[in-house]
Amino acid sequence: MKKLLIASTALVASAGFAAADVSLGGSAEMGIVDNGTNTQFHNDIDVIFTLSGETDGGLSFGATIDLDEVTNAGDDNGIPSYDNDSSVYIKGGFGALTMGDTDGALDWAMSEIAMGTAIADDHTAYFAYDGSHGGNGFFDSGTILRYDNTFGDFGVAVSAQDIDQTTDAVYALGLKYGADLGGVNVGFGLGYQDAGVAGDMIGLSASTSVAGFDVVLNYADGEIGGSDYDTMGIGLGYTTGALLMHANYTKSELGGASADGYGLVVNYDLGGGAVVAAGYGKGDTGYGAATTNDTFSLGLRMDF
């Protein structure tokens, strides 16, 4: 497939159009997962098309299409369903403009506490975990338009998102800083998001990396659907050779009800894109009826 795509691109280029590249990549997983009720086999395939090109004036442009195959789900007629994500961008000296399934400015600025990988995402799927820090993850429908640019160690972004369920668009601003201070990498992120009557959010994150150790802290506070919301998380990781060990913890509160949980990951890199991955997650929530989830997975992830 790669050879066919490259050959097609070469034909287009030779026909007098601006040079462009089309590449095909993706990942596959196999192993066992346990959702707290039963243990079963798991396999998943994710295919990613990456398109890129450049104008005569030096502007870069491109698109990403993520075809995440979900073979265990389907519609009422038994037809498999697919979760297709895509985004388009153009960038140059003015910065970058991205539209589609991409991070809003708040999410863009904040650092994730999760590290490593698990075939069932156990370390990020437990109750309370907030991968968007109260940002656009609460508003999954609608297209995001984001402008971002960097100035040395600083970065800035603004974004707008149209939401199907409300009459208000979502606007966000993000700022971040990252530098190497004598062998110690540090990073800071600050973001704000306003979703009108749906609520607003402000978030802050800090991270550091030194001698194989990684530490990330993040915090967000605001209002969602008329209820006060805040979340805090910490992630710790250690890498030595091919081995990565990671743990994270999150605590969130929404309208007086709380949820917390933690995730664990152990990865061993076999090289060539193959990683043995073990994951565990446990969370408790008081949102609605009190519920606990407890999951683990073990398997092989392969990146192509």
Image (tube, grey):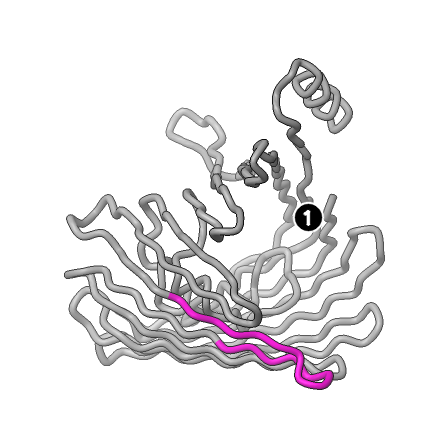
> What residue would you read off at disc 1?
29
Q: Is residue 28 above or below residue 268?
A: above
Residue in view at x 74 percent, y 54 percent: 300
Q: How far across and down, in percent of the image, does residue 48 sit?
A: 61, 39
Q: Is residue 71 above or below residue 78?
A: below
Q: Residue furthest top?
A: 15
Q: How far across and down, in percent of the image, does residue 290 sit?
A: 32, 73
Q: Residue 211 vs residue 271: left or right?
A: left
Residue in view at x 83 percent, y 51 percent: 272
10 Å crowding of disc 1: few (<14), some (14-19), many (20+):
many
Q: Residue 145 vs residue 267: left or right?
A: left
Residue in view at x 55 percent, y 70 percent: 281
Q: If the image is split into quadrants, where does the C terminus sit?
A: top right
Q: What's the amino acid at mark 1?
A: Glu
Q: Magenta residues, as a range? A: 174-188
Q: Residue 219 vs residue 290: left or right?
A: right
Judging depth in this view, the residue of 214 and 8 nearest the camera is 8
Is 227 in the magenta?
A: no
Residue in view at x 66 percent, y 13 percent: 15
Judging depth in this view, the residue of 100 and 271 nearest the camera is 100
Judging depth in this view, the residue of 43 and 230 nearest the camera is 230
Give SS at disc 1: strand
Q: How far across and down, in percent of the image, does residue 42 sit?
A: 64, 48
Q: Is residue 194 above or below residue 252?
A: above
Overall secondary structure of the magenta section: strand
Q: Residue 232 vs residue 142: left or right?
A: right
